[in-house]
Image (cartoon, rainbow, N blue to C red):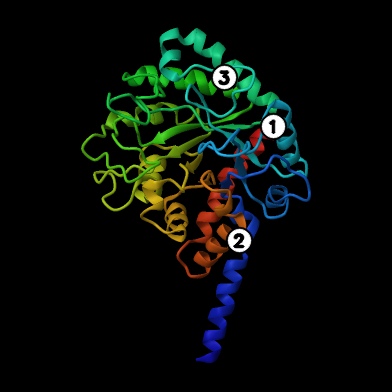
Amino acid sequence: MKKALLLTTISVAVLSASVSNKEIANMFMLGFYGTKATPNTKIYNDICKSGLGGVIVFKKSPIKRGAAKNFTDAKSLKSLIAGLKSCGAKPLIAVDQEGGLVQRIKLTRSYPKASVVAKSGLGSAKSIYTQMAKELKSLGVNFNLAPVADIALNPKNRVIVKWGRSYGSNYKNVISYDKAFINAMHSYNIATSLKHFPGHGSSLGDTHKGFVDVTKLWKKVELKPYMALKNSTDTVMVAHIFNKNLDATYPASLSKRIVTNLLRGKIGFNGVVISDDLQMGAIAKHYTLKQRVMRSINAGVDIMLFANQLNAKSNISIQRLTKIVRELINSGKVSEQAIKAANIRINRLKNRLY
């Protein structure tokens, strides 16, 4: 009995050892506080030694307290990003740059919101987004968490429609302008992310704040942009919305039925799947950190985003996240195959960008 137990322990150890901590860390994208990336800074070592897959940068914290979170001007951002890349790693350097309200980099110019762009015509859209891509490229950003693929179906929507983040209520127009956005980014070798799958334009609530159920509001037409652009976009961002007709148990970002069966299976998307911020109230109030990580991986999510926006003193570190995943692997609650598959997709994207 003791011998059998020892062999089992050894087998588990060997099994867990075949996935490295760097492969685990590669599945995370973190926000961080700090304006420099030198060998004596944590974020530099997180990328260069721990294998953190990517970062998301902000000019200032959304809570509008204190100093700038990562940069104050173009010079400081370029210096920061150069430092993040200086050790030879291939980090994803992401930013939310849609235009309008969601425009994290507002330095030399401001970009119009989607609803305004949609009224200006595709020619104008191409010009606007090419300029945006050129600016991002000059700064060192290689991943834009946009465009919004949500269809403006609900006039009372407080997250997308209210702020003009959608290109309209006609899915064909949404597809056309999303395509123009993606092409502009790709012309400067910047990755894109269609969001928020499986569709946030019909919702009433705000997933930043709490649970959002779209069961009675969501329509199948909201999948059209993803079906049309599955071979154009690099990544798809999955929302935290709940729809019991798609999954009666879990919100989209934690749902295997929605990520693996619907997005990868029925729709046929073969790129990288990234979660919306896993610290948002819609799921953080209902699932522990360990549950969020476990459910995300088992759903088929490749990159788990933790923006670390709320409090500099309560940042979630890559060391803590790596430890959680290692425990999940060792206990059999997460498979090594899922980690390996995610790394193949992530590294395929990184190799296109570097």
Inspect this view and state whether residue 142 appears: yes
Which percent across, then down, holds residue 270? 48, 39
Residue bearing mark 2: 19
3D distance between C-alphas at marks 3 and 1: 22 Å
The numbered disc on residue 336 is none
3D distance between C-alphas at marks 2 and 3: 37 Å
Amino acid at pointer 2: Val
Q: Is residue 148 above or below residue 288?
A: above
Neighbor class of circle 2 (other Cα within 10 Å; few <14, some 14-19, many 20+) is some
Amino acid at pointer 3: Ala
State the SS at label 3.
helix
Residue bearing mark 1: 77
Residue bearing mark 3: 184
3D distance between C-alphas at marks 1 and 2: 34 Å
User: Which mark is first along the chain, 2 or 1?
Assistant: 2
Q: Nearer the viewer, mark 1 or mark 2?
A: 1
